[in-house]
Amino acid sequence: MKHTAITILLVAALMTSCDTTPKTANAQTANQETEKALPYQVRQTHRGDSARITAWLKEGSALKSSENLVMFYARKFIGYPYVAYTLDQDLEEGLVINTQGVDCTTYVENVLALTACAKKHQTTFADFCRMLATVRYVKNDVAYISRQHYFTLWLTDNIRDGLVADIQLPPAPLSATRTAHVDYMSTHVSSYKMLNAHPKWLPAIKELEQQVNRTKFTYIPKAQLKDSDKYRKYVRDGDIIAIVTDKAGLDISHVGFAIWHKDGLHLLNASSLRKKVVDEPMTLYQYLQKQTKSVGIRVARIL
């Protein structure tokens, strides 16, 4: 949608579900060329972000078309620190750029934006900023009420924009259908720094939640992942894995990328448990058994 212990919060419904303790960063002003080219404020968290992004885009654009660009960029972040609340350090919304510390959602967003730009041979920092705004916000509108706070909305919007696709899964019992039911943000306003500071935004957030609650999706029940090999022809390395949760008010509790090993399907993710981006050594089935509220996974593919 376009826009590890599971923590209480989701982005700012899921941008917080992978988060633990807020950390501050010395935000740097984006370069003047990009500032002039874009109709919103860009906030670079680290001085080296723009140079790193440009170098990565040039590197990815030069790869052969047979290369798995998603995995190429997803592996770039391995070992980078997990940082909570990366989008909510300020009281006003801006396009936050942070490649040196990610939560689970911003990790996926960065990889998607890098992949989409590289496939189009777009190699400037401004190109990346425009793509990230498309990935993170509804209709590229960099505003708090347009951010895709719930991952169901994130997928819906990015599917509509042609950046990702839903995976067609096999019929039951290998898959199941679920209707989203979210209201966590509107019922826990004090947990969201910007929303708490701007109560006038609450009606728009409630409307966003109602939109999410009209969504049905197909997912793989976690019990079926005990023998994950039966999904090898459906799930590929680099597919987005979204963990479906039974936690009240939430839809998805954590996200990452599929990666296959000899012993089955694993999760490449920004882990709050391990405090960094890791190729999780446990199989995804073993990982989900430790998440008591998890019910399965939703799968989508970056195009």
Image (cartoon, helix red, strand yellow):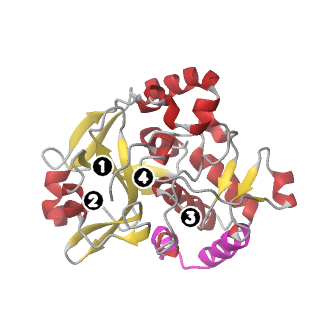
User: Which numbered disc, 1 or 4, marks the residue that appears first in the sequence?
Assistant: 4
Residue 264 seen by the camera? yes
Label 3 or label 2, whichever comes before in sequence order: 3
Instruction: Name the residue carrying label 1.
Output: 168
Residue 300: x and y in percent read 38, 52
Work out whether mark 4 precedes mark 3 in sequence or the reverse, and give the earlier one: 4
**Residue 80 lies in magenta, yes or no?**
no
The residue under the point 52% across, 75% down is 76
Q: Are marks 2 and 1 in contact (CB under 8 Å)?
A: yes
User: Separation of disc 1 and disc 4 at Cα?
Assistant: 27 Å
Label 4 amino acid? Cys
Q: Is residue 61 above or below residue 83?
A: below
Task: Give the spatial CA distance, label 3 vs label 2.
Answer: 31 Å
- Report the disc number at residue 18: 4
Q: Earlier in the sequence, mark 1 or mark 3?
A: 3
Q: CA distance from mark 4 to mark 2?
A: 26 Å
Q: Secondary structure at mark 2?
A: loop
Image depth: mark 1 or mark 4 in front: 4
Which amino acid is tagged 1?
Gln
Residue 145 seen: no
Tell me if residue 54 is in the magenta stretch: yes
Q: Which residues are magenta?
A: 50-73
Residue 109, percent across and down? 54, 56
Q: Position of residue 25 (x, y in %)?
A: 66, 59
Q: CA distance from mark 1 to mark 3?
A: 33 Å
CB contact under 8 Å: marks 4 and 2 = no
Circle 3: residue type = Gly
From the image, tell me which residue sits under label 2: 234
Question: Which of 176 and 289 lies nearest the eye of the viewer?
Answer: 289
Crowd rating for badge 3 (residues with CA inside 10 Å; few <14, some 14–19, many 20+): many
Q: Is residue 299 left or right of residue 79?
A: left
